[in-house]
Image (tube, rainbow, N blue to C red):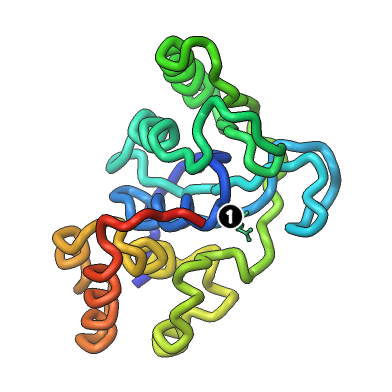
Amino acid sequence: HDVDIPTKKATFGMGCFWSNDSLFGATTGIVRTRVGYAGGTTKNPHYRNIGDHTEVIELDYDPKTVTYEDLLDMFWGNHEYGLTTKLKRQYQSMILYHDEEQRLAAEASHKTMQIRCNGQLRTEIAPAGTFYPAEDYHQKYRLQGHKDLCRSLGLDSSKLQTSHLAARLNGYLVGVGGMTQFEQEVTRLGLSEKQAEYVRRELERNEGGGLAC
Ligand code: MHO
């Protein structure tokens, strides 16, 4: 059930990375996700020693299914701590672009948002430098709360940053993506009927709820 198609990368800082991981994980066109630290200069950041880096999410997306502009819309629309609040660097709003096309799209969307925010926007735009993956316990944080499901699917720590299924479930389990979309891809995801029932129950319970950390 892993997906082998050409992908592009996108990197965003939008506050605590746990909820962003779930948000994008169940979004159409997102193939894989991982969370980590980037945007700073200090070497080898860790959660407890983050230096001048920021919590970011790195996405592998299928550009035939979702555009970078779509991802930017999600970026602007889903900041847990807002776009104009002064925050510590850990939660800095940040777009890290991977090529010229992304830079231009990011800057154009920033311009529009800046007007809407009366010039108070604090978002940074910078080239994607080194991405340092976060510790395993931060990857697919919501999914990892479901130990038995992970075990039954063989989703151990080696898969957390690379598995399409892990990305999807990390969203669905907290209600992202919705039941209709889940039913459309449940067969492709390769879940047993029992596993699918479990996910449906959680999805239903959490749908419409917030993603707050
Ligand atoms: N509210 C959470 C934020 C964690 S996020 C990975 C905490 O204080 O642990 O920054």
Q: Is residue 88 left or right of residue 105?
A: right
Image coordinates for residue 31, horizontal then vertical, percent: 39, 55
Q: Is residue 38 left or right of residue 50?
A: left
Residue in the picture at 54% in, 80% down:
156
Residue in the picture at 24% in, 89% down:
194
Image coordinates for residue 102, horizontal then vertical, percent: 49, 26
Say what amino acid the circle numbered 1 marks: Val
Circle 1 packing at 10 Å, graded few (<14), some (14-19), many (20+), is many
Q: Which residue is mark 1?
A: 35
Ligand 1 in which quarter: bottom right
Residue in the picture at 68% in, 48% down:
37
Is residue 186 positioned above or below 46 on the image?
A: below
Image coordinates for residue 12, horizontal then vertical, percent: 54, 39
Q: Nearer the viewer, residue 88 or 62?
A: 88
- Picture quarter containing residue 157? bottom right
Q: Is residue 153 left or right of residue 81?
A: left
Q: Nearer the viewer, residue 188 or 35?
A: 35
Work out whether residue 187 can be spotted. Answer: yes
- Picture quarter containing residue 126? top right
Image coordinates for residue 198, horizontal then vertical, percent: 27, 82
Circle 1 sits in a helix, a strand or a loop, which is it?
A: strand
- Mark 1: C-beta under 8 Å from nearest atom of ligand 1: yes
Residue in the picture at 47% in, 50% down:
20
> Image quadrant for the N terminus?
bottom left
Q: Is residue 37 left or right of residue 93?
A: right
Is residue 70 positioned above or below 9 on the image?
A: above
Is residue 202 positioned above or below 79 on the image?
A: below
- Picture quarter containing residue 54? top right
Disc tally is: 1
Work out whether residue 11 can be spotted. Answer: no
Q: Nearer the viewer, residue 12 or 205?
A: 205
